Amino acid sequence: MPPLGSCRIWYIELPPYAQPTPMPCARAHSLAAKHGGRVVSAISKKSFEDGRALAVDYGPGNFAGVPPEKLPPPGYCRAWHERIPEEKQPPAMPCAKAEQLVRERGGRLLYMPGPDLK
């Protein structure tokens, strides 16, 4: 549960330890609208006792089949190519560069949201 006044994007396909950190709600909704995920926020202080929260689902993320340890760090992207071994995948990089790589060579863009604008 994120602190009161902030939100968190939750990806159902990722384990809890690999989830993005809390961030401003406007940023969370904007990123989830573009990259998928469920935006979660506390309803009140009681949310931390009973687990009740507000949630808006923007659809699945793009992480299926990617080991959590291979995800890009917060605020970065990674081009991911199917049928290529994990160890031969391109490294995490700034998103503009990863987007260009996906346009040129195909694959999918993995983006891990971070709390700061990049």
Image: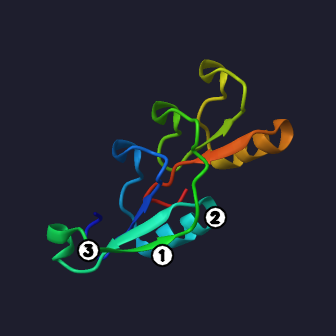
| Near-viewer residue (115 or 49) | 49
Residue 10, horizontal then vertical, whole percent: 43, 58
Amino acid carrying mark 1 in the image: Ala
Amino acid carrying mark 3 in the image: Leu
Give how far apart the Cα atoms at labels 1 and 2 are.
13 Å
Q: Earlier in the sequence, mark 2 or mark 3?
A: 3
92 sits left or right of 47 in the view: right
Residue 54, horizontal then vertical, whole percent: 36, 76
Contact between marks 1 and 2 (CB within 8 A): the answer is no
Task: Give the residue drawn at x 83%, y 35%.
Answer: 105
Task: Give the residue drawn at x 36%, y 61%.
Answer: 22
Residue 106, horizontal then vertical, whole percent: 81, 39
Q: Quadrant where the C terminus lies?
A: bottom right
3 sits left or right of 69 in the view: left
Please give the residue where the numbered disc 2 appears in the rendered image: 34
Please give the residue where the numbered disc 3 appears in the rendered image: 4
Amino acid carrying mark 2 in the image: Lys
Please give the residue where the numbered disc 1 appears in the rendered image: 26
